[in-house]
Image (spheres, rainbow, N blue to C red):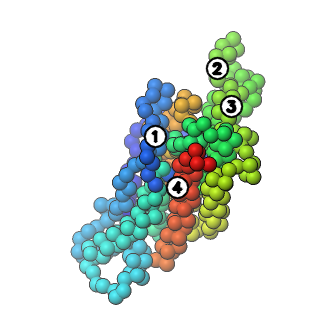
Amino acid sequence: MATQPAIPSLPAPRSPRPSTRGSPSLRAVPRAKVKRFAPRSVCDYPRSADIAGRAVAISPDVPLGFDQPLAAHHKIIGGWVAASDHPAARYTSWEARRRVEREFDAAVLSVLRPLTFANFRVVVLAGDEVGSPAIAVICDSIGQLDLGWIEESDAPVAWRAAAYSALEAMLGTALPIFSYQDLFDEFSLYYWEGETDDEAARQCMIDHHGADPADLDGLMLPAEMNARRPEWMISASSASNTTLPAGLRRPLKVLRATHSRLRRLPDDRNAWRFDFDLIHEYVPHFDECSTLPPMTLVPVDIFGREIDDVARHGMEYGFMDVAGICAVDRPGLVDDWFSSFRAGAEFLLAAQNLIQLDPSTL
């Protein structure tokens, strides 16, 4: 748990754009072989990896002296700890603080332990300027999500497209990640003023960017960018659910069921709720960061240049890496937070299991 995240100091190459996180797609069990992104000249945006050592710790600015009162977030989490302390023990302030941290850390890590396809940590914000503490889930992974068999196997394209389409539609509910459409929209805003038609994009580059009409043949246009997508990235290529093998239907069914449970959680009790305004209330320095999520479903081998362009601000100044934030103004809400935290982890585990399928067994 921490109260003051580090503030980035590098300058931004351009002003932040409105977040693409509103998109339905915007919202990580060990592998035998972890697919890491090797340095490339076209893109320095790494893939996700199996990163060990998730850490949850109280910020050092919380007073540790024997005669100092517990901070508000310690008191609320402490009330949750005390409710299960039978018989209740007596502690000094320092001992109480350490007990609160250990109990909360252990509970959080027990939920996160099965998740290895992205690296998460939990931050408890003191909320001194806001009025009540809040608990935030942060994603520390940056880059392309390793899509395993969906991207690389020889399984039928229709199966791979069905799995990719499901992840694209649902994964952003709990994971800060952007899809191809989000990438296209950002790229279009930057180069074509939001135009999606080739002729309109050409005219935009002439009118707004001073391009020479004779040189337009060498410039990227919307149709060319869309045409570079492999078939497994196009939802229209997906097989219908009834024609999929049972070994693929089952994990897709679990993914949809866990996603539905997560979506039904009330907003004020959802550990994975992305609330842009609430985040800025608790962590004002995000005003200076990119609004782009740190992870993507877009293959960097194909769209490295485009990802570099839209992610440059985040790579230099920080991404919007909050997966969810929930205010907690009394100890009883901590149980609700944990309940929703587990629901989100179950959904992410379902996504992880889908990605890690062995297509030869389907």
User: Mark 4 vs mark 3: which is more N-terminal?
Assistant: 3
Q: Which residue is mark 4?
A: 323
Q: Amino acid at mark 1?
A: Lys
Q: Which residue is mark 2?
A: 219
Q: Which residue is mark 1?
A: 35
Q: Which residue is mark 3?
A: 226
Q: Secondary structure at mark 1?
A: loop
**Marks 1 and 4, how far apart at CA:** 23 Å
- The crowd level at tag 4 (other Cα within 10 Å; few <14, some 14-19, many 20+) is many
Q: Residue at x 45, y 36 (%)?
A: 37
Q: Amino acid at mark 4?
A: Ala
The image shows residue 108 at horizontal and vertical percentages of: 42, 65
User: Mark 1 vs mark 2: which is more N-terminal?
Assistant: 1
- Find residue 17 and report its image quarter: top right
Task: Determine whether label 3 and label 2 are within 8 Å by CB.
Answer: no
Q: Residue at x 46, y 54 (%)?
A: 29
Task: Determine whether label 1 and label 4 are within 8 Å by CB.
Answer: no
